[in-house]
Amino acid sequence: MSEHAIKKLSKRVEAAKSRVILGLDFNDEFVQAGKAAGFESPGQFSVYLINAFYEHISGIKLNISFAMDKYLGDAGFVFDFVDGEYPDLPTILDGKPGDVGDTQLYRARADKNHYHADFYTINSHMGPMATINPYLETDPKCGVFVVAASSNGDAWSQNRYSEGVHNYEWTLLDTHRTYRNKEKDETIDTSRVGFVVGSTKPDAARNIRSLEETHGFAPAWFLMPGFGKQGGSLESVAYAGPNAVYPLSNGLVNPAYLKGLTPLQAVIKWKNLINEASKYESMPMEKRVVKGLLDNDLFWVSAMENKEDWRKLHALNPDGSPNFSPMYYEVRHIQQDFGLMQNASYLIARTIRDAGLNPGAIGMVPYGALGLGYSVASHLELPSIVFRAEAKDGKLDYIGKPPSGANVVPVEDVATSGDSTIKIIEMLRKAGYSVTDAVALIDREGKAKETLAATGVRLHSPIKQSQALEYFDQLCPNHPGLRIANKYLDERRQKGW
């Protein structure tokens, strides 16, 4: 390999105008398809496919496990052929070794000597440094794709939840943190580490990109299997963004998945579908959260102009103004949608980071923001503290004990008047903590900002009510409630509220 693997992949994707990777799985289906086409060995069939598809693919991926039974020689033949005939075509050896120490080191050396691939897939469950470094050190120009979220539904341990988050999130954060801390080491290039993210898991692609955005990591390259036989979703293409490639294997050779197309027609079809899907940029995080609230009936806008009808919309006046509002938020139930709560908490965590707050702990405002607060604290790896809404016998009663004197940032779901946040600020200060800033997911642009400023606290909010209404207009075009909401807001501004 004469060129950095990531640079080689980027150049090939641009040159071919394609993100399709030719998957070579030497299983029974592949071997039979090759024989039906007149080829006695899977190696010869692979060469035929590479020659036929070259203009429309951005690389090849060979699953070495399928070759181990009878076809190791064919596997080596394929890699030698690509190196000789198509040196600009990136190669991926898919084996997912997950051992450590000398065992992984000798596997890395063997893979390099036999296959000299540009990329290797890795299972990092035994620790990123111990499983990934042997490959990066053995070949200073290679890249690795670490298994994050499998497209295979049987991979339950990889796709399950663990302590409130998906295992793939721990994989990503552990790997990113490990290599982020090594950025000053010139022998390690963090861009060489990508992730395997199944295209059958669009939420995984969305959440991983959200995690990267929240923690300030550059978007890693994704290898996204699962199209064709496993039924991958084109939605995952939009979420993944430009740094992603999509291997196709059975979907290109098995008549059951070709659906009357020739293999070349199938490659071109998938190339065009993926390119078209990639034009739809993933929604900004703020818009995703507003959409999630709408989808879960946690935010709505009344189409009725009669204020008495607004009263029926919500029994209590949510914004503390003399009049009821045609807009209603029920964010306290956000935990009913795990993905939505994750996105919202990522957004709050990003707001805290971007504002340079560096808190020592996160404070929760009972009771609507408890779930959000705990999730934010988890993302930022900070302790948390929550007070009972009603103190016992006039004494402070709270759970959690951050270091004495720590700067605590209270987290709210919706800020309107600021009264509930003020109560927590007073309790935190009485308990000996410093409070200079607070964050609310949604600022209804009422009096909360001014109320908190009077106590020396700055209010930060990733979503303003006016912004939420703009997204509402985009997501629900021509909805009559938008005119009513804007009229209400104009009247409120004229009255100084």
Image: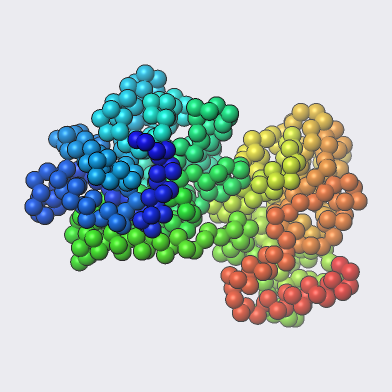
Q: Which residue is drawn at 87% across and 37% down?
A: 430
Taking the image as drawn, is residue 11 in sight?
A: yes
Measuring from the top left, give residue 151's x and y in whole percent: 36, 48
The relative height of residue 381 versus residue 423 in the rendered view (above or below) is: above
Left or right: 142 as drawn, with respect to 470? left
Measuring from the top left, give residue 167's x and y in whole percent: 48, 39
Q: Residue at x 53, y 28 (%)?
A: 186
Taking the image as drawn, is residue 395 in sight?
A: no
Q: Which residue is drawn at 24% across and 45% down?
A: 85
The relative height of residue 9 versus residue 67 in the rendered view (above or below) is: below
Left or right: 451 as drawn, with respect to 345? right
Between residue 190 and residue 311, name the one nearer to us: 190
Residue 271 image-quadrant placement: bottom left
Between residue 106 and residue 367, name the one nearer to us: 106
Measuring from the top left, give residue 288's x and y in whole percent: 58, 59
Left or right: 445 as drawn, with respect to 300? right
